[in-house]
Amino acid sequence: MHKRFPMGPLPEDLHRKLLNLTTNTKTAGAADAEKVDVKSSFNGETIGTVLSGTVEDVEYAFELARAAQQKWAQTPIEQRQEIFRAFHDRVLDNRELLMDIVQLETGKNRASALDEVMDVAINARYYANNVGKLIGEKKRPGALPIATRSVEQHIPKGVVGQITPWNYPLALGISDAIPALLAGNGVVAKPDSNTPFSCLIAVLFLYESGLPRDLMQVVTGSGTVVGSAIADRCDYLMFTGSTKTGRILGRQVGERLIGYSAELGGKNPLIIAKDADLDLVMREITSACFSNSGQLCVSIERIYVEEPVYTEVVNRMKVAVEAMKIGSGFNWDIDMGSLINQTQLDTVSRFVDEAREHGARVLAGGKARPDLGPYFYEPTVLVDVPAGTPVLSDEVFGPVVYIEKVASLEEAVEKANGTSYGLNASVFAAPETGRKIASQIEAGGVGINDGYAASWATVSVPLGGMKQSGMGRRHGPDGLLKYTEIRNVAEQRFISMRGPAVISRKVYADAMVTALKLGKKLRFLP
Ligand code: ADP
């Protein structure tokens, strides 16, 4: 049973174990490497250190991962599945320890940390259960019935690169690696320097569950050095982070012609129709907007409310948000924790101050809370935000949402879609109205009577961004198949594709035309 640690440095033995898992500590330059302090967002205290990586560290990580991957690709699928099923149980059984580390690094509340644990477990289960079906060899109808025996094979790409941000360091640090590994790949991962330990503890659990050592390498360090060196060497790149960095990496991997999946920014809308159940709205809306203090790519930053219910929504929203308990610590009763660091606090403060200067009204929140910790900011709701205010269109990535009145659902949809982003959207309405609106929304995920959790946790369906919110998808079949190359093997038997040698080309051509017509009519061709 995990004994809760105090709010301070990680226990020395655990810290050493995690640090020694990084590739950085295994390379020749380790002794001279620059150290990076990892700080707790709750109080700014150092909880541990990692090494700042170099191109040589990344080079070595690929060497190790490539060697391990050669053997791994030959390992029977059942054996791979067993490792990830054991990992699933280990993650759930050790959830308290995982949540403690996640909370210490990020400053988030316990419920948001639990979301991360659950995410890792459900991805491990889903992909362990489905990998065989997904990558198993499939017989396909061949070009010439009977004469062409065709199979589709999926083979691992090789070594997948993964670059992740600080906001969901456990979930994003591991959940996308799971399908990559199960499909037979190695992984070289770079966690964000603010939050390396959440990823490392999960990698430790993977090893303890039986994953071959070396198959997953974690290199700590900066994005421009380590991240960029990974993008230069990997066989496929999985990135989660800002649209700005996503573009840089897109150019880099485009030059190398390798596959790329990126989940980027969002400015996610939520529509409240006049037939919505407002009690339900009020139960869900604070977590839709303020989970992990709004530092969540799929969380809500814009709310459009149909006129007849606008005043009631605004009044009730004020009460709901002002009742939220913010603070630090491991207790379950805290509704919202800290922001990650000073940069985030500055960004959030700037958006709210600018909105005030433009004449927006702060309905709830609107200020930093240094009494609670260095980076705390209140959950904030803005109304009457004038056109041209940056918060209307730019992603805050913090606990700031605005509410706007709309005259009709058509206007709500138009406004919801009026952005360059398309990651997540939500609609609260009677089911039929909700489905009708959802079908018009330009976003990779849409929740009906739910903020984001239902679509995110439905891991059997691919999820990602339309427009500038990304490319490629995680989850579902696509979330694993993207890490594979397809080999189309066609075996020609009995008759050549060019026809039997004894028949003239003209006769064969006429026969083929007749066969094509018949094949279409009688549906014996695919
Ligand atoms: P955020 O604003 O969430 O920090 P970023 O896109 O800046 O988003 O960072 C997400 C991840 O990408 C981090 O691990 C960061 O170190 C890494 N990163 C940042 N810039 C680059 C870059 N030029 N090349 C590769 N990785 C980068």
Image (cartoon, rainbow, N blue to C red):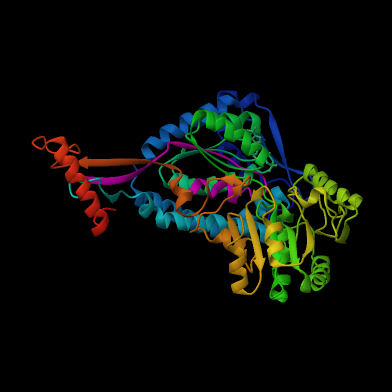
Q: Is residue 269 left or right of residue 87?
A: right
In this rendering, does residue 57 appear at all? yes
Figure check: 269 above or below 202: below
Residue 231 drawn at (x, y percent): 55, 32
Q: Is residue 506 left or right of residue 279?
A: left
Residue 502, relative to residue 482: is it above or below? Answer: above
Q: How many marks?
A: 0
Q: Give percent across and percent down for residue 303.
A: 74, 61
* Front in this rendered view, residue 113 or 307: 307
What stretch of residues is rendered in magenta? 149-178
Residue 384 is situated, as x and y percent measured from the top left of the image, at 85, 60
Q: Is residue 298 above or below residue 10?
A: below
The x, y position of residue 492, in whole percent, is: 19, 41
| Residue 224, image quadrant | top right
Residue at the limit of the structure toward the left, as seen here: 502
Quadrant for the N terminus in the image = bottom right
Residue 194 among those drawn in magenta = no
User: Is 163 included in the stretch rendered in magenta?
Assistant: yes
- The residue shown at (26%, 53%) is 525
Given residues 349 and 526, the one toward you in this image is 526
Q: Quadrant of ligand 1?
A: top right
Residue at image location 66% in from the left, 66% down from the top: 427
Q: Quadrant of residue 36?
A: top right
